[in-house]
Amino acid sequence: MILLDRVTKVYNRSNTALDRISLHVEPKEFVIIIGKSGAGKSTLLKLLTREERQTSGKIVIGGIDYDKLKDKDIPLLRRKIGVVFQDFKLLPNRNVFENVAFALEIVGFGNKEIEHTVPRVLDIVGLKGKEKRMPQELSGGERQRVAIARAIVRQPKILIADEPTGNLDPKHAWDIIKILEKINHYGTTVLLTTHNIEIVNKLKRRVVTIDDGRIASDRANADYGQTQGGARG
Amino acid sequence: MAKRRGVLVAKAPGNHFLITQWRIVKTGLQNFARNLTLAIAAIAVMVITLTIILFSLITSATFNNTVQQITDKIDISVYLKDDVGAQKREEVIDQFKALENVKSVEFVSKDQALEDYKKANQDKPDLLAAISQTDNPLPASLRVKPKDPNKIEEIRTFIESPDIKALQSDATSYSGERKDAIDNITSATRFFQTAGLVGVAVFAIVSMLIIFNTIRMAIFNRRDELQIMRLLGASTWFIRGPFVVETVVYGVIASILSVTICHFLFVVSSSTLGASSFGLLDINFASKYFSDNFLLILTGQLVIGILIGAVSSVIATQRYLKFKTPK
């Protein structure tokens, strides 16, 4: 589903953010990416959503070779990948329903289908009855649920969650993770970056550690002890 | 999660093209309403631009009409000796007609000249008395009308040539006063046309710059929103379209306003003030020209307004929305 082969990203010709990263993610896999701030996690995700281009190496996602991807086809690529951000990135002038509907409007869904689909997705993330609320009236956890609903409403094969729990308290953070697990359970490949070692330990999924632009470790069912986790977090 | 296959597929079924276009227009109109203060500034400058364009068009047409009317009256009178026979006369007329700049040649006989003279001096009985006591002293003449009164050199050279000179009784009359008037109007027309062109160019650029800035501010205010749209996979046209729609609305409003302003300037002022002209400007003709060509004028203004709006917003979004991924 996701294939990175010796991917390198160099900023300004000297600042190497990623150094020959190779990673293979199977369909329906749930992969957690951890690493310190500045380790290269965000750069990696930006390459996947094509906000940035790799300097060298190969990226293939869902059969799409990024080297052959034209600028005008980037929107089509992004429609196939759901993305959840740490800062939610909700449209401030639109209510909950409209924020989720927007993802469908972009693709050209009709109003009937939107009215049919959006409430069901809001139900999945537990926001039933809050359709008319504006983003600023919601708690952080609720906002992140809206963002997740928006990311999954087009039923993407891949969901990228960039520190979705970074701004949330532990209880809400765990709610969000449970939603991600549920989405993964229904067949979506999930890529999650986090600082939260507690979540990593609880999830017991494949963990890829990035350090200084390189993959430091890649373990299945990883469990980090509290002390090590503290150092990583 | 009760998602069924086919309900949530990424590609929407049916008429999604039209729905998308409609959404783009709707968003553009909403943004227009939201950015009203910025819109007013942009529209104001566009109105000035379009009004100058329209005003110079109409004044230039009016001046041309005035020049045409006076030009039609200008002629060169070549006075003939009494002994020039009919045959010789016809020969000369044909020679005149062969000249490039000659529009028409009219023969005025001695009798006709006397009639004209009497008519022109009806209120001067002593002159009339004097002329009736002698034989007809007035010469027959050829009244030559040039096509372009500014280019009579060729005709003049022909008149001054020895063959023709020998037939003439008096010095040729070039209706000099009229030529001065024509020169004045022609140079005024040229001045207004040049000033109009310069004004149009300056204000077109200024209004484009203001529209650039309006859109740049709108982009700046909504840069987060635009980034989100982009990350969600909105197409370039889906992001850019509303800006173009917004500025096209500026153009439509501005062109309607400018046509209204010119309507008041020409049509209303001519009918309420009862004025027939402002200085050199024949306001009656201007008003008639405006009314006769109203639909054409309105369409032209709409096209210019929409073009200024669309072009400047496309360039502004190109510059400030960078549609390419940085390498």
Image (cartoon, coloured by chain):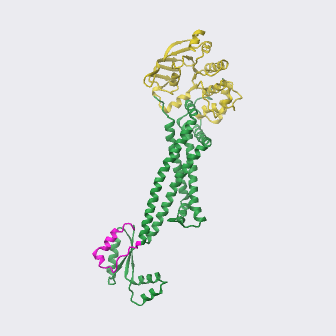
Chain colours: A yellow, B green
A2 and B57: which is toward the camera? B57
Up/down of B62 relative to A31, above or below: below
What residue is shown at x 57% (from left), y 46% (from top)?
A: B41
Tell me residue B216's x, y (percent): 53, 39
Q: Quadrant of the C terminus of chain B?
A: top left
Residue B16 visible, this orientation:
yes
Q: Quadrant of residue B226?
A: top right
Up/down of A37 relative to B55, above or below: above
Q: Does the magenta portion include B68?
A: no
A223 and A86: which is toward the camera? A86
Q: Quadrant of the N terminus of chain B?
A: top right
What residue is shown at x 46% (from left), y 54% (from top)?
A: B197
Q: Does the magenta portion include B155?
A: yes
A159 vs B141, left or right, is right
- Farthest left residue in view: B162
- Farthest right residue in view: A129
Up/down of B255 relative to B228, above or below: below
The residue range painted magenta reads: B149-176
Residue B3 visible, this orientation:
no
Tell me residue B46's x, y (percent): 54, 49
The number of numbered discs placed on residues in the rendered structure image is: 0
Tell me residue A201's x, y (percent): 61, 12
- Farthest bottom residue in view: B133
Q: Quadrant of residue A163?
A: top right
Tell me residue A94's x, y (percent): 64, 34
